[in-house]
């Protein structure tokens, strides 16, 4: 089978992780949530008190990078790889609103991005990988065989994220979540290093009014088409 590399980028809460997991499972590929890696570094910064009074001590975080060991370990029961920070499973800890509040600030630090991009590129060197994030098709895998860019209206994305947090038991307001979504959009799109942007050869999918099943079928068809073409060209 001719394996390919699939890069999925897009704004926060557009369902990148959900579609990436579905696609990886259907194709028998490895799924990598690059955003979870940045969240793990953010969690480290919070636990180490490098974030205080809404201020991030970038210099100390940069100095701490050699002490931050990240690993993705596949969980067969859940069907995807979970994030480990210094040998501790932090998959649940990185999904709260506090981490969401600061992750874009951490992700804009060049030294952090260099460290994580190198790890991500190593993960995808043998292809057969579906990776989602903000700069996968533009920086991590600029030669990816299939690039997707997901978008949706901010209020729709905030509603999805709000429901997700409530189901987790988090006490948040919709206004907080919407402000966080808009803030992350702004920071991700305007940062100097690896800003969120659509790759020129990416297929754009606006899922504001699109159901999960419809979106999955469309994406799977795109992937199968690319795989078929690769087989013909081999």
Image (cartoon, grey):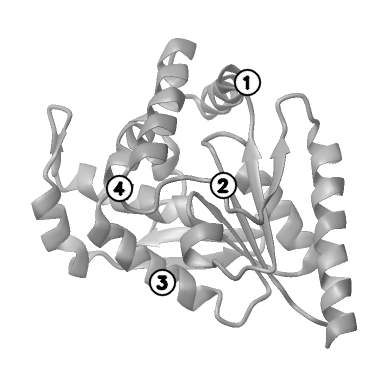
Query: Where is residue 216 drawn, in percent x and y?
Result: 81, 46
Q: Viewed as shown, does residue 112 lie left or right of 5?
A: left
2 or 1: mark nearer the eye: 2
Disc 4 is placed on an element classified as: loop
* Residue 112 appears in view: yes
The residue to which callout 4 is attached is 192
The residue to which callout 1 is attached is 156
* Residue 87 appears in view: no
Distance from Cα at disc 2 to Cα at disc 4: 15 Å
Residue located 72% across and 40% down the image:
205
3 or 4: mark nearer the eye: 4
| Whether label 3 touches label 2, CB < 8 Å | no
Disc 2 is placed on an element classified as: loop
Query: Where is residue 176 drawn, in percent x and y?
Result: 40, 16
Sequence-wise, the earlier of marks 2 and 1 is: 1
Distance from Cα at disc 1 to Cα at disc 4: 27 Å
Residue located 83% across and 57% down the image:
222
The residue nearer to you, when weighing 132 against 46, is 132
The residue nearer to you, when weighing 81 against 213, is 213
The residue to which callout 3 is attached is 119
Query: Where is residue 23 drawn, in percent x and y?
Result: 75, 57
Distance from Cα at disc 3 to Cα at disc 2: 22 Å
The residue to which callout 2 is attached is 198
């Amino acid at each position: 089978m001719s394996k390919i590399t699939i890069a999925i980028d897009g704004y926060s809460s557009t369902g990148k992780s959900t579609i990436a997991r579905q696609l990886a499972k259907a194709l028998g590929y490895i799924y990598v949530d690059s955003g979870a890696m940045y969240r793990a570094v953010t969690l480290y910064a919070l636990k180490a008190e490098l974030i205080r009074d809404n201020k991030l001590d970038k210099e100390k975080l940069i100095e701490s990078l050699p002490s931050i060991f990240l690993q993705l370990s596949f969980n067969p029961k859940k069907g995807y790889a979970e994030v480990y920070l210094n040998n501790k499973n932090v998959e649940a800890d990185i999904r709260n609103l506090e981490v969401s509040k600061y992750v874009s600030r951490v992700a804009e630090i060049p030294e952090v991005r260099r460290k994580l991009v190198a790890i991500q590129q190593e993960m995808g060197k043998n292809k057969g990988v579906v990776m989602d994030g903000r700069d996968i098709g533009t920086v991590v895998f600029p030669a990816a065989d299939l690039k997707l860019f997901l978008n949706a209206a901010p209020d729709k994305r905030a509603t999805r994220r709000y429901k997700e947090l409530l189901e987790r038991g988090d006490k948040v307001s919709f206004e907080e979540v919407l402000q966080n979504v808009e803030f992350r959009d702004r920071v991700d799109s305007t940062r100097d290093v690896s800003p969120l942007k659509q790759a020129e050869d990416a297929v754009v999918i606006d899922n504001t009014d699109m159901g999960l099943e419809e979106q999955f079928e469309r994406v799977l068809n795109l992937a199968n088409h690319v795989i078929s073409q690769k087989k013909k060209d081999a």
